[in-house]
Amino acid sequence: MTAPGLDELVRDRRIIVCGGSGGVGKTTTAAVLAMRAAEAGRRAVVVTIDPAKRLADALGLDGLTDEPSRVVGTWPGELWAMMLDTKSTFDALVGKHAADEAQRERILGNRFYKNISGALSGTQEYMAMEKLYELAEETDFDLIVVDTPPTRNALDFLDAPARLSRFLDHRLYRLMTATNRGVLRAVNVATQTFVRTIARVVGADVIDDAVAFFQAFDGMEEGFKLRSKRVQERLRDDDTAFVLVASPRRDTIGEATYFAEKLTEGGISVRSLVVNRMHPRFDDGLAEATAVRADSLAGTAIGSLYRNLADFQLVASREEENLAGLAEKVAPAPVVRVPFLRSDVHDLEGLRRIEAELFA
Amino acid sequence: MNPTEYFAASRLLIVAGKGGVGKTVVTAALARAASMVGRSALVVEVEGKSGLPRMFGQATPGRSGLGYDEALLHRGGPDGSADIAARTITPDGALLEYLEDHGLSRISRRLVTSGALDVVATAAPGIRDILVLGKVKQLQRAGVADVVVLDTPAAGHAITFLRSAKGLLDAVKVGPINTQARDVLDLLEDHERCQVILVTLPEETPVNELVETAFSLEDQVGVGLGPVVVNGIYEGLDGLDADPVAAAAEAGVTLRPGEAEVLAAAADFRRHRIDLQAEQVERLSERLPLPQIRLPFLFESEVGSAEVDVLARSVLAAIEGLDAGVQLGSRA
C-alpha cells in the first residue's frame, strides 16, 4: 500500500497541521493546502500564527483577524483565513471553564494572568491547538489547516497542553495558595521560607499576583485538564495529518529531523514532507568534474559558465544529501520538493505558482 | 575603518535575525574576523543546540554542541590570530549561578526542580532573558575576551529578548532582579560597549522584517545598531552573459549535445537571482540607512572552518570599507 500523497490529504482529512522551524515557508504552504482543498470543492479554513501581512495581502484581504474571513476566488469550494490571537483564545477558554461571571472577571483582570499569554512558554502553542480543536468541534469546515509557531523547542506544541495543565495544577501553587489561606501554615514552614525567599528576589508584588491568580483559578483545573486531553487525542486522530515543512539547508534539515523524531515519540506520524527553496538541478553532472573543467578553462567565458554550473551542481547535491536521512525517517511519507521561486508571493497568482509545484 | 579598532576591547556584539537567515554562521564569521585581527572572542549561544563547534572543524559529540562551560573553538597562533571560545548560557543555568552568587544556593535547586521558575517567569515576564543577559553582562565586564558575540534566540524573539530589561523594571520595582535589569539596560544603551548586528537575506520578506525590527529596537530598546549583515549574496562571474556556443568556440572547446542549454539555463538562473538580490539590497539601503556587510552565498552548504574563514575575510573587507566617519551605533 502506498502512502497517501499531499492531494489525498487535502481531499480526505479534517485537520492538517504544518510544522517546522521558522523561515521555511510554513504559513504559505498552509495557505496553499487550504486553497487546494477549496479547489477540490471543500470548505477550508487556514489558521495562521504569524500575523503575516503578506499572506493577508496575497489572499486579497485587508488583514487577518481572529474570526474567519472569506477569501474571494473562483474555486467551487470555500476558502477562509484567520489569525490566531493567543490572548482572546485564552480568554474564551477561561470563560468556558469559569464557574460564573465573577470568577471569569477575577481571572481576566489579574496581572499575572495578563502575563501568561506572552510569557509562559508554550502558551501560544497550546492556544493554536485549542483553536484547532474548537474549530473542529464547533464549526462545519471540511478542512482546517493550521501552522504551528516557530518554536525554540520542537516539542512545545505537543507538550504545551500537558504543560499548561501541569502548571495550573502545580503542587507548589497549591502550597502557595494554601499557605495564604492559612491551611498549611503550621505544617509547611519550609515552603513558606521558600516562597519568602523568592519574594525577596523578585519582589512581593509578583508573588501576590501569582497567588491571587491561582486562587481565582481554583476549581477550574479539572476542566482545563480534560480539555487538553481531548486536544491531545484529536492531534493523534487518524483524521489529523501532520505535514512537516523544511528547507534544504543543513541546519534546518537537522531541526526538522529532530522534530520528526519527537513527533514519532509522541505518537504522531508525519504524513508528508514539504521541502521549500530547493535549488534547481540543471543536469546530472558531478560538481567535482565540472569544477575541474572550469579550472582548466579559467579566465575564459566558457570557464565561467562551467564554474557557475559546478556551483549549482554542488549545492543541489548537498541539498539532496542533507535531505536523504530525513526522507528515510519520515518514510513512507512522500517528499515534495518545491524549487526556489523567482519572486515572493504577493497575490493568489503567487499562491497558485506554489500550488503547481506542490501538486506537480 | 580599521577592523582592529572595530573589534576594540570590551565590545558586545548581539547578533539578531529571524530563523533561516544564517545567524549562527554570521556569529561564527564575526568571531573569526575578530580573531584574525588578533582580538579574542567569546561566542555565547542560548539554545544549547548550536552547530558552532562543527563550523570550527570540531566534530560534535551528540546533539548538544556546547555546554555551560567554555570550550575553545580556535587556538590563537603564530599567524597572529587570537583565541575563540564559546559557551551556552541557559536561563536555568544562569539562575542557579545567580542565586549561588547571591548566597541563595539553598533554594536554587528547588526553584528549578519544583518548576517554580515557571511561575516566577510568568509573574515577571522577561526574567529568563534578563538572567541570560545579566550573565552576558557579567562576562563582558569581567573582560573574558576582547569581544563577546551573542547569538540570540532564533524564533523571532530578538525584540522581546532585548526589551526584557525595560519590561522588568516596571514589573519588579525593588531587589536584586531590579538591579540586574538596570545594569543590563545600562549596557544595552551604551553604544560604545554594545551593538546589535541584524542579519537578513537579500529577499523581500526578510528585508521587510529586518527594517521593522531595526526601527522597533531603536525605538523600544534604545540599543545601538551596528552594520547590517546581508547574508547569502550570489557573487557575480565575468562571462556569465556569454553565449555558451560562441564562448566554447572562442576557447576551442567542443560542447556535448545539450550542454549549451544546460550552461545557459544555469547562467540565466544566477543572473536572475543576482538581479533580484541587487534590487532587495538597494531597497534595504533606501529604507534603512545603516552600513551593510554583504556576505557571499556559500555553494558549499557544509560550513566548516574553510567556509567560516571565507566569510570572516568578507567581514573584514566590509569593515575596512566602512566610512570611518560613519558613527556606528546611530542612524545619523
Image (spheres, rainbow, N blue to C red):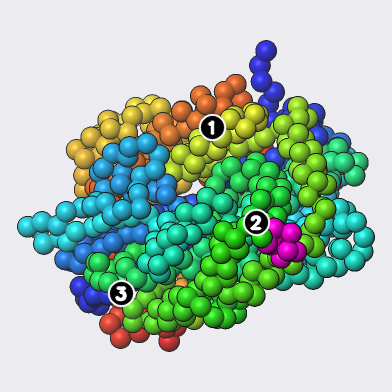
Q: Which residue is mark 3?
A: B141
SS class, disc 1? helix
Estimate the x, y position of residue B139 in percent, counting from the top left.
32, 68
Magenta segment, prevailing SS (helix, strand or loop)? helix
Which residue lies most toward the front here? A186
Whether callout 1 and callout 3 share a subunit is answered: no
SS class, disc 3? helix
Amino acid bearing label 2? Val
Chain under callout 1: A
Q: Residues within 10 Å of mark 2 (few under 14, many from 20)?
A: few
Q: Which residue is mark 1?
A: A261
Amino acid bearing label 1? Glu
Estimate the x, y position of residue A315 in percent, counting from the top left.
39, 39
Q: Is residue A303 magenta?
A: no
What's drawn in magenta, residue-wise?
Answer: A176-185
Q: Would residue A163 appear left or right of A327 to someone viewing this image?
A: right
Q: Which residue is mark 2?
A: A187
Q: Residues within 10 Å of mark 1 (few under 14, many from 20)?
A: some
Q: Would residue B4 appear left or right of B23 to someone viewing this image?
A: left
